[in-house]
Image (spheres, helix red, strand yellow):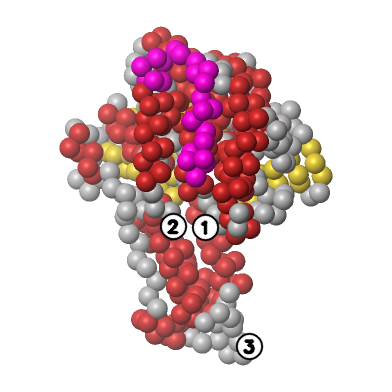
């Protein structure tokens, strides 16, 4: 939804909060709820999705909009007076992409989303001044591709690294409410905001008709959850790493984090092993555990000039690691230099193709033109994320697999003899699936001195 004159007014007030937070990095804000007014709620509503799944009350945007101004005023009055009751979150499970594992997603009510968005707008104005540069997840004007670019740049600058690949076990389910409140109160001591956040943390979860009240965790899918997760990990990991760990290391090191996914790179193996040893203790102090099998140290040094991609004279080869849907590995550039390349993770490739196959099977009786239109949209969406420099092999393979799957289900539209490949080849001349394209390039990094 486009910005309105009201958006500029709210933006000015956000800038005021941000300026105060930047000028006084140790200050705790005691009076913030006066920023929450009808203009602020209208802007929060503008930024809230209207077509999302409904919560436990079943209320849609169309129903809420029938008496919009009165609803907003009522919501504001209840939020400030303390009479607002946070409804339970409706929990559903979506495939995780690895075997039969699923990821629980919480779906708040429309009014809950709106009020959470309003509070997030206040918190972001403060914490965006505090968060470290290595944090990228769910932050304004930051993206996964920026995290990947930063990882690529820093790894190339130090000639590879010892990569500590870390997996936090069930982070969103294990997030400790007591520690989170302590972290929040370092910067926010406004009673109205803290009371609302407390209500959302204790709202309960409705799953399969059963209502439960978890003592820890923040439901994934809630508007407020990403910034609460970022605040928690800022103090547990980012700030600790910058202020306590890096000054004690012998060589260079960097941290790249996207929400609860992160890797740490070290120039020296000794530094990497020291941090690897202390990291479980650091997270355990705050009620979190690291997955023992998925947390590992990967030797990711640049191969020698004479090495081959399969290993050097002694058969050694640098390892690989995964982050944000990509497998990172060393390979030769077109000029023969060793560079870090990325390719689509095998599990993500399989998951994307499985979804395409299921869609083709379900919609095989739709008109071919309509199938082509939607398939093209899905493929462009895949390219928009995975279309990065060096990933052309996986992208082209994905296109060919989609072609194969589409043909498989088209020829099953009718019983009897199946048409030959020549029939599909003629069809493809009219309905040509989008070619694989590279959307995100790393070559602009050369201007910054990275080769």
Which residue is nearer to you in this view: 275 or 107? 107
Q: Quadrant of residue 116?
A: top right
> Residue 342: x percent and y percent?
38, 45
**Quadrant occupied by the C terminus:** top left
Give the structural element (helix, strand or loop) at label 2. Answer: helix
Give the foreground label among 3 and 2.
2
Q: Quadrant of the N terminus?
A: bottom left
Instruction: Work out whether mark 3 precedes mark 2 in sequence or the reverse, and give the earlier one.
Output: 2
Q: Residue furthest bottom?
A: 416
Crowding at dot 3, Cα within 10 Å, few <14 / some 14-19 / many 20+, comes out as few
Residue occupied by mark 3: 415
Q: Which residue is tagged 2?
A: 382
Q: Which mark is residue 352?
A: 1
* SS state under label 3: loop
Q: Residue at x 46, y 14 (%)?
A: 27
User: What residue span does the magenta drawing correspond to?
Assistant: 20-42
Answer whether labels 1 and 2 touch (C-beta < 8 Å): yes
């Amino acid at each position: 939804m486009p910005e309105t004159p009201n958006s500029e007014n709210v933006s000015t007030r956000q800038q005021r909060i941000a300026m105060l937070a930047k000028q006084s990095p140790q200050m705790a804000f005691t009076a913030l709820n006066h920023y929450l007014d009808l203009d602020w709620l209208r802007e929060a509503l503008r930024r809230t999705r209207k077509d999302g799944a409904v919560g436990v009350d079943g209320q849609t945007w169309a129903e809420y909009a029938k008496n919009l101004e009165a609803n907003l005023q009522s919501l504001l009055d209840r939020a400030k007076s303390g009479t607002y009751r946070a409804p339970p979150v409706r929990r559903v499970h979506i495939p995780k992409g690895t075997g039969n594992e699923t990821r629980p997603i919480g779906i708040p009510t429309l009014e809950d989303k709106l009020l959470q968005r309003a509070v997030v707008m206040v918190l972001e104005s403060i914490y965006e001044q505090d968060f470290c540069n290595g944090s990228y997840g769910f932050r304004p004007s930051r993206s996964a591709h920026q995290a990947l670019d930063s990882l690529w740049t820093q790894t190339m600058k130090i000639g590879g690294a010892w990569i500590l690949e870390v997996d936090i076990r069930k982070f969103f389910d294990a997030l400790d409410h007591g520690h989170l409140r302590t972290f929040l109160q370092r910067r926010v001591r406004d009673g109205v905001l803290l009371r609302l956040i407390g209500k959302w943390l204790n709202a309960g979860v409705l799953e399969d008709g059963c209502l439960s009240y978890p003592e820890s965790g923040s439901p994934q899918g809630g508007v407020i959850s990403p910034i609460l997760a970022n605040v928690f990990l800022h103090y547990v990991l980012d700030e600790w790493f910058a202020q306590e760990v890096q000054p004690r290391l012998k060589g260079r090191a960097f941290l790249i984090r996207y929400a609860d996914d992160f890797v740490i790179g070290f120039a020296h193996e000794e530094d990497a092993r020291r941090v690897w040893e202390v990291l479980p203790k650091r997270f355990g102090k705050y009620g979190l555990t690291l997955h023992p099998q998925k947390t590992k140290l990967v030797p990711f040094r640049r191969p020698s000039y004479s090495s081959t991609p399969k290993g050097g004279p002694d058969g050694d080869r640098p390892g690989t690691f995964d982050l944000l849907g990509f497998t990172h590995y060393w390979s030769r550039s077109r000029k023969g230099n060793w560079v870090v390349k990325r390719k689509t993770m095998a599990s993500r490739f399989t998951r994307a193709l499985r979804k395409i196959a299921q869609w083709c099977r379900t919609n095989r009786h739709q008109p071919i033109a309509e199938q082509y239109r939607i398939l093209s949209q899905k493929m462009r969406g895949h390219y928009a994320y995975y279309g990065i420099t060096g990933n052309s092999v996986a992208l082209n393979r994905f296109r060919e697999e989609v072609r194969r799957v589409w043909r498989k289900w088209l020829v099953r539209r009718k019983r009897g003899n199946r048409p030959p490949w020549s029939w599909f080849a003629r069809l493809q001349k009219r309905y040509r699936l989008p070619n694989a394209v590279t959307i995100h390039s790393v070559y602009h990094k050369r201007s910054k001195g990275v080769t």
